[in-house]
Image: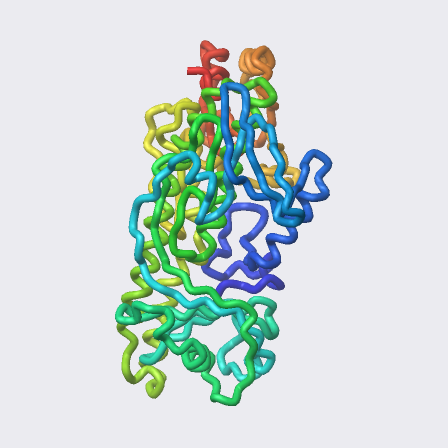
């Protein structure tokens, strides 16, 4: 069982109690996360936050982007001039259309009716242990219920059967009551309702010169365990430090080609992970035993089968920390093959392209906290001279600091150069003979 928020820092016996970073995984519904992020953006002194502003078109040149927008609050139109444009505008992305990026993949995985309901009396009726996610499987209906506020609001995903090809042909109220296990007189309120089709689609490119797409604008797949949101945040983080380097002058504009080179293969892999899990669960939904409601033995056996199937997608440390960039133009590879990974397992590694492994420092600080937001040269032997590399970085304006760390078994080399996104850019036991060439490599100079 995955611990609840109350026990996250103390309960380590669960399937992801081994989590490799200082901060354990937390679940948060998007209706709570989005306002939090919006508030942080709105209050940041270096961000101009504009809501209800829609880009209708844009033009670009060698020096910038000019976007034409409409303000849906006032109805007025506005022209915005910027250095770069990043479309994080969701599945129906206007920016994706404008850069002529095409989505390809699997257009049909399955149909789902999602209903957000308020049912104050439901929690008291539940016989099972209270949980964030409840799988409902019976011969009549299969669904997933998520507790949104932990008290009375729920998100119900009603999975349509293969022969149910029209949303309107399904009695939504009957399905919801069957899923909740309540009678016709049980009172609940529908807050919102959405019908959607699960897909696995990936844009054929993430960029047109100064315009980029990230998140759902660039890739769509079945919403399993938040992979889409996690991948979208990783997209934005990957692009943000490269853009920052260009805007601050220490990175060559050619570095921006690395964003697509790194993120496209990863999102392709993640989309297949998500799809394979969804298809496996769908096959299981079609194979619910007829006696599941009458046989405790059948329920226990089927429940264990479902637990084994679902646990990896919700305890996905491998998917978060195991992926690696193996064809990047801004990573100095050394010929060693990165270790494979699954959704829930991975082998921490310092092979260039892998995620910089987390360790606790001698002063009980998290390594990730100590590294800071820029490039960081981890030195595991203070006797190793690094002046040549630091001078080369200073000469190019590359933000690089040295962090001395006690020797750790997982770090075989004495020096590991970690990027702002915590992926290894280079490693070695001594500064390379031509440190300026290494600095130019990681800042995008061909």
Q: Which residue reaches farthest front?
A: 76
Say which quarter of the image contains residue 393. Answer: top right
Residue drawn where x is 35% and y is 64% of the image = 111
Residue at 30% across, 60% down: 279
Image coordinates of residue 27 in percent, x first then y, are 55, 58
Q: Is residue 53 above or below residue 178?
A: above
| Residue found 50% across the figure and 61% down from its top | 13
Q: Is residue 97 left or right of residue 399?
A: left
Place residue 373 in its image quadrant.
top right
**Residue drawn where x is 52% and y is 35% of the image:** 86
Rendering coords of residue 57 (x, y %): 50, 36
Residue 205 rendering spot, x and y as whole percentages = 37, 35
- How many marks the image carries: the answer is 0
Residue 402 or residue 227, whichever sits in front: 227
In the rendered view, would you say 82 is above or below 366? above
Q: Is residue 264 left or right of residue 116?
A: left
Residue 237 visible to an observer of this rendering: yes
Q: Can the viewer see residue 379?
A: no
Query: Which quadrant: the C terminus?
Result: top left
Query: In the depicted view, which residue is nearer to us: 353 or 161?
Result: 161
Task: Pick whichever, 265 or 197, lies toward us.
Answer: 197
């Amino acid at each position: 069982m995955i611990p609840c928020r109350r026990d996250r820092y103390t309960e380590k016996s669960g399937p992801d109690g081994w989590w490799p970073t200082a901060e354990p995984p937390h679940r948060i519904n998007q209706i709570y996360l989005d306002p939090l992020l919006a508030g942080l953006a709105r209050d940041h002194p270096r961000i101009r936050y504009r809501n209800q502003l829609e880009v209708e078109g844009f033009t670009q040149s060698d020096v910038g982007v000019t976007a034409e927008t409409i303000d849906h609050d006032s109805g007025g139109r506005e022209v915005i001039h910027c250095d770069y444009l990043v479309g994080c505008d969701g599945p129906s992305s206007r920016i994706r259309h404008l850069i002529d990026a095409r989505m390809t993949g699997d257009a049909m995985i399955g149909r789902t009716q999602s209903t957000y309901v308020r049912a104050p009396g439901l929690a008291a009726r539940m016989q099972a242990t209270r949980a964030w996610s409840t799988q409902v499987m019976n011969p009549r209906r299969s669904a997933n219920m998520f507790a949104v506020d932990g008290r009375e609001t729920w998100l119900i995903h009603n999975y349509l059967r293969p022969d149910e090809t029209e949303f309107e042909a399904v009695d939504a109220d009957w399905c919801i009551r069957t899923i909740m296990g309540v009678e016709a007189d049980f009172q609940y309120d529908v807050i919102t309702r959405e019908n959607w089709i699960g897909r696995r689609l990936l844009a054929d490119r993430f960029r047109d010169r100064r315009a980029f797409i990230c998140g759902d604008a660039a890739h769509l797949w079945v919403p399993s365990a938040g992979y889409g949101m996690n991948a979208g945040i990783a997209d934005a983080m990957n692009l943000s430090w490269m853009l920052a380097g260009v805007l601050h002058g220490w990175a060559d504009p050619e570095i921006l080609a690395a964003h697509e080179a790194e993120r496209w293969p990863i999102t392709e892999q993640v989309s297949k992970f998500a799809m394979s899990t969804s298809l496996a669960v769908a096959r299981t939904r079609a194979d619910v035993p007829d006696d599941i409601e009458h046989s405790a033995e059948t329920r226990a056996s089927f429940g264990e089968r479902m637990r084994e199937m679902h646990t990896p997608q919700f305890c996905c440390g491998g998917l978060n920390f195991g992926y690696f960039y193996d064809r990047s133009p801004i990573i100095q590879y050394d010929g060693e093959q990165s270790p494979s990974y699954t959704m829930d397992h991975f082998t921490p590694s310092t092979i260039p392209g892998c995620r910089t492994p987390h360790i606790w420092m001698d002063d009980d600080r998290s390594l990730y906290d100590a590294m800071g937001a820029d490039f960081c040269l981890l030195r595991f032997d203070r006797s190793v001279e690094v002046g040549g590399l630091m001078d080369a970085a200073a000469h190019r304006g590359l933000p690089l600091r040295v962090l001395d760390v006690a020797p750790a078994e997982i770090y075989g080399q004495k020096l590991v150069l970690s990027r702002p996104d915590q992926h290894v850019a280079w490693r070695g036991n001594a500064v390379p003979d031509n440190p300026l060439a290494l600095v130019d490599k990681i800042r995008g100079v061909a």
